[in-house]
Image (spheres, helix red, strand yellow):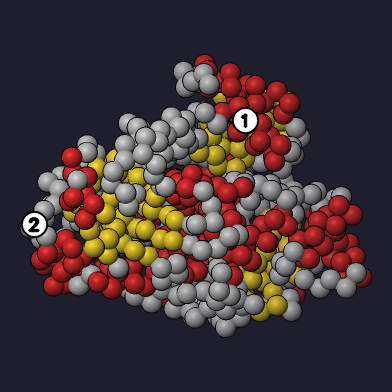
Amino acid sequence: MYYKHKLYKSQKIKIGPTSIGGDAPIRVQSMTTTSILDTEKTIDQCIRIINAGADFVRLSVRSMKEAENLRIIQNKLRDKGINNSLIADVHFNPKIAVAAANIVDKVRINPGNFADDSIREKLIPLLNCCRQSGTAIRIGVNHGSLSNHILNKYGATPEGMIESAMEYLRICMEENFFNLVVSLKSSNTRIMIHANRLLVKRMMEENMNFPLHLGVTESGEGEDGRIRSAAGIGTLLAEGIGDTIRLSLTEDPENEIAAALKLLHNGKGRLKIITDKPAWNEYHYSKRKTNEILDIGGRNVPVVVSSIPVIKGTKLDDDAIIADFLYSSNPDFHLVHEKSSFITDAPGWQSHGSEFNKLYPSFNREEFMKTSYRSESLNFIQIHPEEINNHLLDNLTEFSNIVFILLCQPGKRNKLIRAFNLLYQSGLPVPVILKSEYPCSDKELYILKAASDLGMFFTDGLANGLWLENPNFPSGENVNLTFQILQATRARMFKTEYIACPSCGRTLFNIQDTLARVKNSTHHLKHLTIAVMGCIVNGPGEMADADYGFVGSGPEKITLYKDKQPIKKNIPAQYAVEELINLIKECGDWIEK
């Protein structure tokens, strides 16, 4: 069980026999990808999800016939001794939601398509049904499917997401229905984090304290999907926000549970809660103002730093993903690579390293303050968060060519927040590179933990670089993970960005195979964002940032989008990847491998 101290005190509610919110453990769930009408396949998948450790299983329900089959599925699971609650996921049709509410323990509705007018008239029958049957409701807002009246007033913004939820919650409050969960999801981690923080603030202002379900939609598969999910979910959990979670991976659904449990475990078994109030605006992105020193700080994207075992005369592979700055304790080396600059310890640089081009010194705090021999262009100061104080910052105001390398301990985010608070309060515009070393040999745990620990410092625009070390993995893997975290937090793009939904019963083509084929054909197009979406519920909206979109439009049919506009409709799925390539070429965005 994974508990947390709650800065946001959510109320406890029941989903069938299981409590969520309040002092209950954080619950995990996944969603089936089978058609509900295929009873045996759906039951088998539910069992796999539950055996993996899920508390709940969610199923997409699109018709009255599917709603009625929920009862058969639930009864057969009960006959097998499985009592975990099922959740019906309903879009577009309030009557289906009412039918499902008479069967399962929780119904998720989407304010973006439940009712665009006469909301109260359509919602109250569901509230009355759920009150009578003891069924909970999740008000589940998706950034990609906001209603027209919300979009017209607020646009596709965190404020729009919040108001979409609040107008439903206010009706529920007026009707004295409190058996509620709320979620605000987006494929954009920055929007997801800021929207949930602002939702908590707004609910507290209106005397609401409903439990929160967290997730990053369309996060994709493999490492990218886990990193994006951890950067969003892990950031909020560390702030005491969140009562249930789902990692929306384009993989078999039971894989989501294994990753979610590792994220909650976070190497210790308990979450480390941030208690310090930030000095910056935590509800809207604003990059911290810093000096621009060479390629660091100012308007530059965050840099990547890496340690290397240097051998004199080593030449780096031109095709490798190379860090912007490479560190070695040995200043007497000549690495040939035009993409990178180099860092070495200050004593070695002062002895004879200063004669080399693109080589810069790294001091500790005492070394820097005592010496008069520094680089004229760039000096790094490696410093622990607790060493930062007003006296030190006052003494550094005369230097405009320093960069802090802030030494982080995994899970110690409070110390980092205190350090950034002091920087904000002092107004010292020194750029900050975060350096963190992880000892874990489990690769999945490593990437989940690093993204969870460090993601917020980039979604909030605080840090100017990242340096990851893990002795259990080659330097190249650490560098790649560093770039992946920066991309997941929208801080720096280094490869093709894929937005891919996890699939559900609404998806009518094999999305895992399709995503693999799309990636295989387009992975070299590093300037593009490509969305692969299972259906129209969230597809067109969640791919708003995408250059090209690939959306299921019917059984084995695909519609291709360019900049949110449908261009080629109802293409047979087997030809869709080829047609996507043709569309990219027609629009002049194709680059030969």
Which is nearer the eye, 372 or 173?
372
76 vs 102, left or right, is right
Name which residue type carries label 2: Ser
* Labelled disc at residue 520: 1
* 8 is higher (above) or lower (below) than 507: below
* Labelled disc at residue 372: 2
Name which residue type carries label 1: Asn
Tell me what residue is drawn at x 60 percent, y 43 percent: 500
* 29 is higher (above) or lower (below) than 525: below
Residue 154 appearing in the image: no
Estimate how packed mark 1 is, as few (under 14), some (14 to 19) or many (20 or more) residues with alpha carbons within 10 Å: few
Tell me what residue is drawn at x 16 percent, y 72 percent: 390
Regarding mark 2 in the picture, which secondary structure is present there? loop
Tell me what residue is drawn at x 35 percent, y 45 percent: 326
Q: Quadrant of residue 264?
A: bottom right
Q: Quadrant of residue 30?
A: bottom right
204 vs 210, left or right, is left
x, y percentage for residue 391? 13, 72
Which is nearer the eye, 49 or 264?
264
383 vs 97, left or right, is left
Q: Quadrant of residue 104?
A: bottom right
